[in-house]
Amino acid sequence: MGRLVMPGDLLLNKPVRNPYTYVKDEKTYAAVVGMFDEQHSKFMPIKASYLPSLRDSVIGMIEEEKPIGYGVNIFSPYHGLLSSKSLRTTFNVGDIILAEVFEISEVKDIWLSRPVKLVGGEIIDVSPTKISRVIGKHSSMLNVLKAGTGSNIVVGKNGLIWIKGGDVAKAIDAIQKIVREAHTPGLTDRIMNYLNVTPEMLERFKKTPQRGFY
Amino acid sequence: MGGNSDMPLIVNGKRLDGRRLDELRPITIEAGVLNRATGSAYLTWGKNKVLAAVYGPREVFPKHETNLYGSIVRCRYMMAPFSTEEHGRAGPNRRSREISKVMREAFENVIIKEVYPKTAIDIYVDILEGQGSTRVAGLTAAAVALANAGIPMRDIPIGISVGKIDNQIAVDMMREEDNFGQADMPLAITPLSGEIILLQMDGKMTREEFIYALDLAYSKVNEIREKQINALREFFKKSSAAVEEENGEGSNLNGIEQEGETQDSSQETNTLDSISE
């Protein structure tokens, strides 16, 4: 499913804008080490820092209390901010929250909204570029993980994954497998095998109502 | 430096360590050696041993150095006190500050700074053992560390030194040649575009010698680049090594080189076509 490219390798003969590529003489070149899928013109960096974009759900940690709200560490080069105007609850420093990016100011202040406190559980961090594979198309991979382990899993776009209940160790193993093999095709099927998930189980899982974050 | 010395540097057409004039010392590079750094590399170049680490993009401290329109690049080159024959003093000195500066300016030319505004990219280059041409060895290692860290770059620069010893032009100067030769010229080159992003010279060369030295340096660029690329490939193979063990027959690692089978590709990676709209 593509080839490993190095910074400076030619990707496309037409100019395309992307944070991980650059354009020179109307041609697109890779700017980081990544996998390039020629057939679908897809470029997936091996490693990259999280660049927030609007409506991303991220997992962060309350770092400080400010007059305007809270400073949130979202494990990105930029600081998350949570305005207390829209908040009905209070948080303590050290709380883990799931929140949505709703505004990015021109000085790269990341304003978050709709925070949900995540209590207990375990958190692992993976490369933010691999998160799309952990979720899968229409959450296909995430459903397999949840059905196979019985865990409650919340995936933040910034690379943090919160896991609670069920077989946490198995879930972590499976996620690390996904991350290692993120560049290979047919991954969902392999994870289904790995977790012994049958299509029937998956269908049954999809029909049952989802639990909340507790 | 700059004059004729009593020490013969070329004997029977061979240099002190038995190399030809246009021969590099053996180079090995390993990427991703440090767990806590964003990217790292360990390089040996002859007897030189270099550890390079990259941190970031991360928040800028002190805050007033922030650039709103791009990341700032900071570089610290340091020779360990035990890296040379005579035990040195720890900490920065005039020489290491100069090299840090020229190295930073070299990397500012290849790093695409606009991607992460308001951040700092810190490059640390530590010479654990120095036997001549450490700044180009350090730069070569730092370039691998930057690529390993996923910092957007236009190219992976390489460093190489050329010089004049016993009235002849040679590539890759070692300590004795640096100390007792007539000229020493470290260079950093971006292999794909062929631009020179660092050039310093100590000593004297004629115009013809300079041009010949430059050509000699360019002829060695690909040799060094290959080592860097291999290190990055090896790191990728290592970090996805489990694929080989578990998948037995259809080892997917081979799929990297050749065309993989068509597949539904069920993920939401950036489709370059859709972004261009």
Image: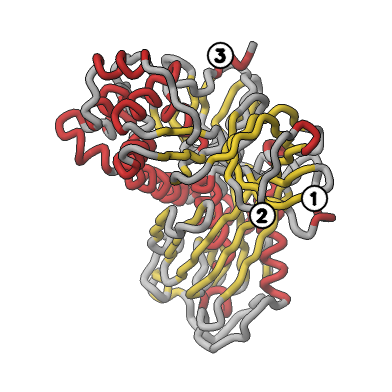
Residue type (three-letter) at the residue carrying disc 3: Asp
Of the pair B174 and B212, the residue shown nearer to us: B174
Instruction: Give how far apart the Cα atoms at labels 1 and 3 are.
Output: 34 Å
Q: Name the chain under label 1.
A: B
Q: Position of residue B103 (x, y in %)?
A: 66, 58
Q: Say which label, 3 or 2, has the lower sequence index.
A: 2
Numbered badge on residue B66: 1
Instruction: Give how far apart the Cα atoms at labels 3 and 2 are.
Output: 37 Å
Q: Say which label, 1 or 3, has the lower sequence index.
A: 1
Q: Name the chain under label 2.
A: B
Placement of B9 over or under B135, stated as above or below: below
Q: Circle 2: is it few (<14), some (14-19), or many (20+) Cα within 10 Å? A: many
Q: Kindly report which numbered mark, 1 or 2, lies closer to the viewer in this rendering.
A: 1
Residue bearing mark 3: B273
> Does the rendering let one see residue A206?
yes
Q: Residue at x 58, y 45 (%)?
A: A96
Q: Name the chain under label 3.
A: B
Residue bearing mark 2: B198
Of the pair B189 and B86, the residue shown nearer to us: B86
Q: Kindly report which numbered mark, 1 or 3, lies closer to the viewer in this rendering.
A: 1
Placement of B79 over or under B63, stated as above or below: below
Q: Circle 3: is it few (<14), some (14-19), or many (20+) Cα within 10 Å? A: few
Q: Tell me the quadrant of the picture where the N terminus of chain A can be found.
A: top left
Q: Residue at x 46, y 70 (%)?
A: B48
Placement of A206 over or under B122, stated as above or below: above
Residue type (three-letter) at the residue carrying disc 2: Leu
- Residue A136 in which image quadrant: top left
Residue type (three-letter) at the residue carrying disc 1: Thr
Q: Are marks 1 and 2 in contact (CB under 8 Å)?
A: no
Q: Residue at x 58, y 74 (%)?
A: B79
Say whether residue A33 is left or right of residue B26.
Answer: right
Q: Circle 1: is it few (<14), some (14-19), or many (20+) Cα within 10 Å? A: some
